[in-house]
Amino acid sequence: MSPMPEEQSVSGRVKSIFFQNPTNFYKILLLEITATNLVWPESEIVVTGNFGDIKEDETYVFTGKLINHPKYGEQFAADNYHSERPTSKVGLVNYLSSDKFPGIGPKTAQKIVDQLGVTAIDQIVKDPKTLVPTGLSPAKRDMLVNNLKANLGMEQVIIGLNEYGITGAMAAKLYTLYADDTLNVIEENPYQLIADVDGIGFRRADQIAAKLNIAADSPQRLGGAVLAVLGELTDGEGDTYVDLPRLLDGAIGLLEGARNVEVSPKQVGAAVVQLAHDHAVVAEDQRVYPAKLYDAEWAIAKRLQMLIREKPELIPEAKLRAAMTKTAAGITYDETQQTAILTALQQSVFVLTGGPGTGKTTVVNGIVRTYAELNDLSLDINQYDEDHPFPIMLAAPTGRAAKRMADTTGLPASTIHRLLGLAVDGTDFEPRDLPTGLLIVDEMSMVDTYLFRILLSALHPGIRLILVGDKDQLPSVGPGQVFADLLRAGVLPAQELTHIHRQDAKSSIIPLAHAINSGQLPADWQQPKPDRSFILCPPNQLATVVGQVAAKAGKKFGLDNMQVLAPMYRGVAGIDQLNPLLQQILNPKKTDRTKEVEFNDRVYRIGDKVLQLVNNPEQNVFNGEIGIIRGITDAKHADTKTDELTIDFDGNELTYPRRDWSKFTLAYATSIHKAQGSEFSLVILPLTLASRRMLRRNLLYTAVTRAKDFLILLGDPRAFTLAVQEVADNRHTSLVARLQTTLPHSPGALPQQADSDQVKEPAPVAAPPSGPVQLTPALVAANSIDPMIGMSGITPHQFMQGENHG
Ligand SMILES: Nc1ncnc2c1ncn2[C@@H]1O[C@H](COP(=O)(O)OP(=O)(O)OP(=O)(O)O)[C@@H](O)[C@H]1O
């Protein structure tokens, strides 16, 4: 065996920093060498790597290896570094008595070093109390500790992270998130990173845990795996609970996959019980919920119960009809529309659903106008002010949907977040209380369990709440299928609109959408129509053809009014592939002087269409909104001293410094999910069998209903046929059961649908707990949730089989 090669290292003073990437810690520097074990004839060397707060003129030690860069020649690629700290007693005394630590002279420094030895700095930083015996005054002790930490702070964190195998952009991300607490968080529970940090999954967290000597069967590790699976299936995939066998199976898969060990269901079951005792999860029968989702479903049901108990004063039907007719403005409402308006105004909570063109907007307008007439309210908003707010509130989950609502009603509408004054995106914020009055929420299918809970918590008895949506569209991105569940429960007054009104000879898109929704593509769906067409095209040519279509359409419709929608990011006709190609066609680099900036393998230019990826209620821009880049400011001229982009979201111009550029991406092509709540004059929809896994009826239906005037379908016809045939699985939720427990059946509710593939029996549930829901040992016992009961020696596979049989 050859001896281990000696670690290569180089120490010296940083002469200059040539380059630093602001999005991670990557730097290139020139070092004046003071010591090295390299064979290196020169006095300087170029060093590259991920470094925290390296400063020019300070001295550091780098370890790593000498590499030969094809373009730049020999340089030192460092994988670790630390500030060169004094290692001899004399050096340490000199350091501590230097002007970095005002008030500490050579004598005091000598005393510290005599008592604590050469590792004094590490000891002091780790535990400031080690300074007590030195007799230093508390003020001086604080100064010493703070200054040592300030000198070491970020560097220590980055070095610590490097030791756990976390470098570059991920290290930067963690430091931004937890700052000086980073290492504490990781050392306390590395599995916490799975929930907190995008991009860290169980395997990565477990590698860190292994370095921390967390045993393969430690409760922390088992709990980490359970929460990882639970998070993946709830916040990740939309369920609000996970069946115990599936949870155990998933957790065991993770635990055994990440380290070569065997883990028994019994051990994982014990971890679930522990998590339940710690109030992180709630287990009920065979279902395990993240506590916040369990609480949210109950809170929704109870709040609705409270709102519904407060019945509005009954209005005589003749009076109601008269008001409705008087304000109808030339429209003769059909029978279901009439029922909808009349019922809505007699109830405290009302749910309205319908496909495209069935008159939801018409009914919303009817409700607003009849309500105003009955209550003698002016619809001229200029007559209201802060002290007398407009008593009709209109809201939608996205900015675009809210804008559409304002356009179609002629009244102010806002996002739900704005309405509630939620400044930060999250799940546990106190909204401001809303006045009683009329509140209409549109695009309810996009509202997830968390947001609905927050919305309801802002409402008080006496409010009239109208929830409007299309139950057949894709469910919310976040967990739950709130809107569909509200209808399915059959306990809330509701009306479904089915008659299509917007069906003049010109429109063949709406009938196509309804046909898709009922499970059939019309025989002529591939035939060209004035407003839609199908282009047959093999997968490998799809991107090019989409580009050709977009090039032609771009001239006619403009960027704003045309949208390419695709089901997937990856693949030959995926969003990631289409975006640069469409950018090249629709907004190319015109001359050598065209300004452009690079970020994460993407190029951005003025005029680019971009998609916001996160909610930012403070600036009134939301996940899924589309904007146009209006300006690029060089770092030299920007206040933040980094490059900045100015993006215009429908008149709302926002500045994004480079560190925020991961909050948007190109939007020439977007996912169908992100397009929910938006409509476009022209939709271009390529589908192939490559996205087979994603193809569902509600996905295709949602995509097609985004097209207002024109629709171009492209690709493989089999993909369209398959999509129509595949009915999406219901998400696993308990809202139906909670609602049925808290509310009596409503005579005005929708009949339970006969279409059995759309409906599932609600899971049987325990009686509602009174007061705040908390898992007490008694409740644990009462619900026989102990997952270990009868399970010893049973494999997850057998467990799953057992589930199928009973
Ligand atoms: N009872 C009616 N009589 C005549 N026209 C109607 C009636 N109801 C709706 N319409 C018309 O049908 C069209 C579609 O109605 P509306 O916009 O209200 O439907 P919608 O369900 O909101 O559709 P979408 O979700 O596609 O926006 C509109 O042009 C509207 O004026």
Image: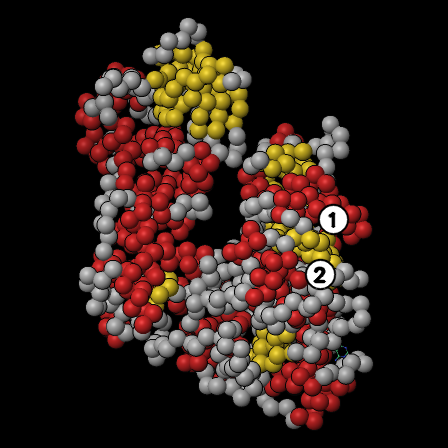
- Mark 1 vs ligand 1: CB under 8 Å? no
Residue 272 place in picture, x, y as percent? 28, 60
In terms of image quadrants, where is residue 676? bottom right
User: As rendered, which of 690 and 162 lies closer to the eye?
Assistant: 690
Q: Residues within 10 Å of mark 1 (few under 14, many from 20)?
A: some
User: As rendered, which of 642 and 88 lies closer to the eye?
Assistant: 642
At horizontal 24% and vertical 26% (from top left) the residue drawn is 119
Using the rendered image of the protein, determine whether residue 429 is visible from the camera's viewpoint. Answer: no
> Which quadrant holds the N terminus?
top left
User: As rendered, which of 682 and 55 lies closer to the eye?
Assistant: 682
Residue 711 place in picture, x, y as percent? 72, 59
At horizontal 39% and vertical 65% (from top left) the residue drawn is 241
Helix or strand or loop: what does disc 2 sit on? loop
Using the rendered image of the protein, determine whether residue 126 is visible from the camera's viewpoint. Answer: yes
Extreme residue toward the top, this view: 41
Left or right: 691 as drawn, with respect to 32: right
Q: Which residue in the protein does label 2 denote?
A: 526
Q: Which residue in the protein does label 1 denote?
A: 549
Q: Is residue 579 above or below residue 474?
A: above
Instruction: Estimate the spatial distance between the alpha carbons at disc 2 and disc 1, rounded to whole Å.
Output: 17 Å
